[in-house]
């Protein structure tokens, strides 16, 4: 099979996660990365790359590869299997983004945040580091303009899917032009995954579904690295496809095709402008994978009515989570302790406390947040985990997902009291 025939087996820009690196030998992978860098530079020098058809783009890549591999084979003969792997690598790693293609082609790079032509940050296996790759200012502006045209959106915050990438463009007046490219994986956390892992069951999943459909607000609390983002991923991926949803994050760890906004390196003023721009579109659900209390406070304070909301906080207990929010409000807004606690009860309906387990995590508690006669928060335990078993007592109206046209208030009035249930988790002794 010729190289040309191999290239015809692939779409130029497939909507699948590239796993080619898993089967490449170190020598061939090194060759691919070297050639990828050279190809990226070549494409960057072609201002009309996006005007070419896919067949024309494929032909240019074919000519490049043919010439380069001929030179390489003068030193070492390539097997047919190696040529297949090289072909697959290139077809899965060419976007026409110039030097950025070199970064996207690397499996360990999960996302790229371009603040300016010489300030490019990458999410490298979970760590945010500055890349030594730079991009020409004119090419960056050209790239932003062409991607904006492709999105067919005319606003200051643009988010869309470009094959297997989530693309976010942030423009003035929010901030100076910035571009975020995030790889979208086809493997997603959802309730089915958590049920198979025996982290929750159908009752708990239905409680979450119903609560979000009723516009409830959750605070996910846990120590660092326990599983807050994983649970938030499941919340996001379980919302209905036709429901508008937005996630704010600081590193792009959420694996979902909803609208993503990375607030990293934005000033407080820029963040508030971004919040206002997003909230103005009135999404049905908003999620915040940020351990930034002030940002979550500003966001919660601006939420549209009946908008489902979930945010994360690093805390050892629900009491600590409430104290952190209270201290942040009193320190920054110069309000009383009592007023800050009353505001907390308006921001959140439930606190979910996660705990590390041997295999993954468990939901240690779910507390419903209410107020007492003095207006301060009271926590009513709705779920607990002890000795490997979940015990829960959810409000009946939030165990079964109500019909789309149901009145949430009437639904709560008509449902009978919920019964207590228990569920033996996989982590029992």
Image (cartoon, rainbow, N blue to C red):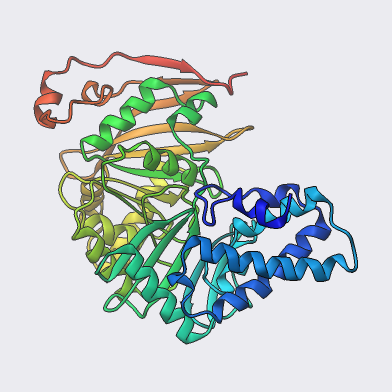
Residue 101 is left or right of residue 390, and the answer is right
Left or right of residue 114, residue 40 in this image: right
Q: Quadrant of residue 360?
A: top right
Where does residue 371 sit, x and y in percent of width and height? 20, 40
Tell me the residue at 32%/74% (across/down): 270
- Residue 336 in the image: above or below residue 82: below
Quadrant placement of the C terminus: top right
Q: Nearer the viewer, residue 200 or 107?
A: 107
Q: Is residue 280 above or below residue 244?
A: below
Residue 167 picture location, percent across and down: 42, 62
- Quadrant assignment, res 260: bottom left
Work out whether residue 380 or residue 211 is closer to the camera in this orientation and state it: 211
Q: Is residue 76 left or right of residue 317?
A: right
Q: Is residue 19 above or below residue 371?
A: below
Q: Is residue 342 visible?
A: yes
Count the numbered circles shown.
0
Q: Is residue 251 visible?
A: no
What residue lies at 20% left-to-right and 56% top-to-bottom?
339
Residue 112 image offset from top left, x and y in percent? 52, 66
Q: Nearer the viewer, residue 328 or 102?
A: 102
Does 102 appear above or below 231? below
Q: Is residue 278 left or right of residue 124?
A: left
């Amino acid at each position: 099979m010729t190289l040309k025939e191999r290239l015809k087996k692939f779409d130029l820009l497939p909507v699948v996660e590239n796993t080619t690196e898993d089967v490449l030998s170190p020598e061939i992978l090194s060759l691919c990365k070297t050639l990828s860098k050279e190809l990226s530079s070549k494409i960057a020098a072609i201002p009309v790359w996006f005007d070419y058809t896919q067949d024309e783009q494929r032909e240019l890549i074919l000519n490049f590869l043919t010439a380069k591999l001929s030179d390489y084979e003068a030193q070492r003969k390539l097997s047919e299997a190696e040529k297949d792997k090289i072909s697959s690598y290139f077809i899965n790693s060419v976007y026409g983004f110039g030097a950025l293609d070199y970064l996207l082609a690397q499996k360990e790079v999960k996302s790229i945040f371009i603040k300016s032509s010489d300030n490019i940050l990458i999410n490298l296996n979970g760590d945010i580091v500055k890349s030594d790759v730079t991009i020409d200012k004119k090419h960056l502006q050209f790239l932003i303009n062409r991607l904006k045209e492709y999105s067919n959106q005319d606003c200051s915050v643009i988010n869309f899917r470009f094959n297997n990438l989530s693309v976010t463009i942030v423009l003035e007046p929010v901030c100076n032009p910035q571009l975020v490219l995030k790889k979208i994986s086809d493997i997603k956390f959802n309730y089915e995954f958590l049920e198979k892992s025996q982290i929750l069951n159908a009752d708990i999943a239905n409680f979450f579904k119903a609560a979000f459909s009723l516009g409830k607000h959750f605070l996910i609390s846990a120590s660092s690295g326990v599983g807050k983002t994983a649970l938030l991923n499941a919340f996001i991926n379980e919302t209905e496809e036709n429901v508008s949803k937005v996630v704010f994050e600081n590193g792009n760890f959420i694996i979902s095709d909803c609208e993503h906004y990375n607030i990293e390196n934005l000033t407080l003023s820029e963040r508030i402008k971004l919040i206002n721009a997003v909230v103005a579109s009135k999404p049905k659900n908003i999620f915040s994978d940020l351990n930034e209390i002030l940002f979550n406070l500003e966001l919660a304070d601006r939420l549209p009515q009946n908008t489902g909301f979930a945010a994360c906080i690093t805390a050892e207990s629900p009491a600590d989570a409430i104290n952190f929010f209270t201290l942040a409000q009193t320190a920054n807004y110069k309000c009383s302790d009592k007023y800050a606690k009353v505001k907390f009860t308006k921001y959140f309906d439930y606190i979910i406390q996660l705990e590390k387990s041997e295999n993954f995590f468990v939901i240690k508690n779910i507390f419903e947040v209410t107020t007492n006669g003095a207006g301060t928060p009271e926590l009513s335990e709705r779920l607990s985990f002890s000795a490997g078993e979940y015990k829960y007592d959810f409000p009946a109206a939030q165990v079964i997902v109500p019909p789309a046209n149901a009145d949430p208030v009437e639904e709560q009035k008509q449902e009978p009291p919920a019964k207590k249930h228990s569920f033996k988790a996989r982590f029992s002794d």
